[in-house]
Amino acid sequence: MKSSRRSLLKAGAAGALSLAAFPARAQEMLAQVEWTEGFDASAPTEQAAQSSRPSLSNQSPFFTEQAIANYTQIASQGGWPTVPTDQTLKVGSEGASVSTLRQRLMITGDLAQTAGDATAFDSFVDAAVRRFQARHGIIPDGVAGGDTLRQMNVPVDMRIQQLQLNLVRLNALPNPMGDRHVMVNVPGAEIETVEGDTVHSRHRGIVGKIDRQTPLLNSKIVLIKFNPYWTVPKSIILKDLIPKMQKDPGYLDRQKIHIYDERAKAEIGWQQINWNSSDAVNYTFRQDPGDLNSMGTVKIEFPSPEGVYMHDTPAKGLFGGNDRFHSSGCVRVQNVREYVYWILENTPDWPKDRITEALTSGERIDAPVADPVPLFFQYITAWATPDNGVQFRDDIYQRDGLGVPQTAQAL
């Protein structure tokens, strides 16, 4: 039975491989401490169709093995050409560079062999570039330049090594994962809620910076906190809060952050702390619920040795970028309301209308999850999906050791 299933899957996978800088204000705000960013723009709509199947599953190793075989065949035929990077190519562009771009896209199945004029960047090429971008975690806009060309020009041999290395990680995925579970792929800053073999929802995430990495874990979501207080971690006190207070002593008052003594009982004034030392780490800093709160309206809790959690954020604009590595280790969730609806779906005391009311009430309310939801934080930078899509993400924490070029923001 197993061998016949594998033969059937191989037959289905033998075809084409895949048919599948921040704005100035964001750059300015990122210079401030990460928990006070004031973005309010919504993320752009995805323009590439996505499968209803989970991106990562216990079937991923098989499809990735098939991708390795296909890429090995491409390598044996000479690989793909290097697309010139001296110009940005888009709809209306013509010439030799477009011809090379078309050839590059055809080799990996993003563009049909017979689609359109050989030297024109037409609607067929636009759609193919978007498919390529979606496969590489780049927000699909159909413009071939910068990050897109950088990813196109990674040699096929390097892509094969990346797939082989990640095949080991894929074989180590938890099995079983559970009928209902959440998968967070840290390099992609991507979150999926999964029921059975179907994705219920996809959410962009914000994950840890290179020096404050999001840990990998297998856990279960057990509690939702609405309108939470935020207690500033010691790492942020040292790296962000002390330098900020040295420059702007009124900062804590404006951000509604209160200071408590070493036993976290009596409130004290900021004037009682020596900000030219590390004494501040001996105190508790707690931010009130509200629009300024760094966790937004929701905190999602689960057991974690590192003390990380998932949460909402007031910095919605960060979800609109390709580079989403700005946190101190916790994971921020786009469209958190839909996420919480799903987590509490089997908790009878928390229907959607009560969740909505809690979110907008401004009151501190806890909602224990009746059926704790399995949660996985994984680190996968290359894999293949059931629809023959070969996916790549930046090695943001430099764990692959392959030297694969990254997007400009992730370097």
Image (cartoon, grey):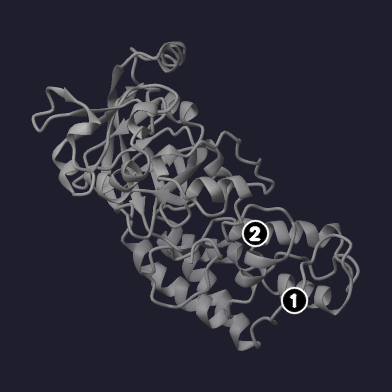
Q: Quadrant of residue 346?
A: top left
* Residue sitting at the far left: 263
Mark 2 = which residue?
Answer: 133
Is residue 347 depicted above or below 373 in this figure?
above
Looking at the rendering, in which quadrant would you find the N terminus?
bottom left
Crowd rating for badge 2 (residues with CA inside 10 Å; few <14, some 14–19, many 20+): many
Measured in 3D between alpha carbons, the distance from the residue under mark 2 to the one under mark 1, in whole angstroms, is: 19 Å
Give, as a three-letter code, the residue at label 1.
Answer: Asp
For the residue labelled by badge 2, is the local secondary structure a helix, a strand or a loop? Answer: helix
Identify residue for label 1. Answer: 86
Residue at (34%, 44%) from the top-left corner?
A: 330
Please provide percent x and percent y for residue 313: 44, 34
Question: The residue under label 2 is which amino acid type?
Answer: Gln
Residue 270 image point, x, y percent: 24, 32
Neighbour class for label 1 at 10 Å: few (<14), some, many (≥20)? few
Q: How many marks?
A: 2
Where, by quadrant of the figure, is residue 211 drawn? bottom left
Q: Is residue 345 left or right of residue 218?
A: right
- Choose mark 2 or mark 1, whichever is in front: 1
Residue 297 or 7: which is nearer the viewer? 297
Image position, residue 332 (x, y; %): 42, 40
Residue occupying the point 74% across, 57% down = 142
Q: Secondary structure at mark 1?
A: loop
Q: Position of residue 53 (x, y in %)?
A: 53, 46
Residue placed most toward the observer, 250 or 181? 250
Q: Is residue 28 visible?
A: yes
Closer to the N terminus: mark 2 or mark 1? 1
Taking the spot 91% from the left edge, 69% from the top edge, the residue there is: 117
Lateral position of residue 285 relative to residue 36, left or right: left
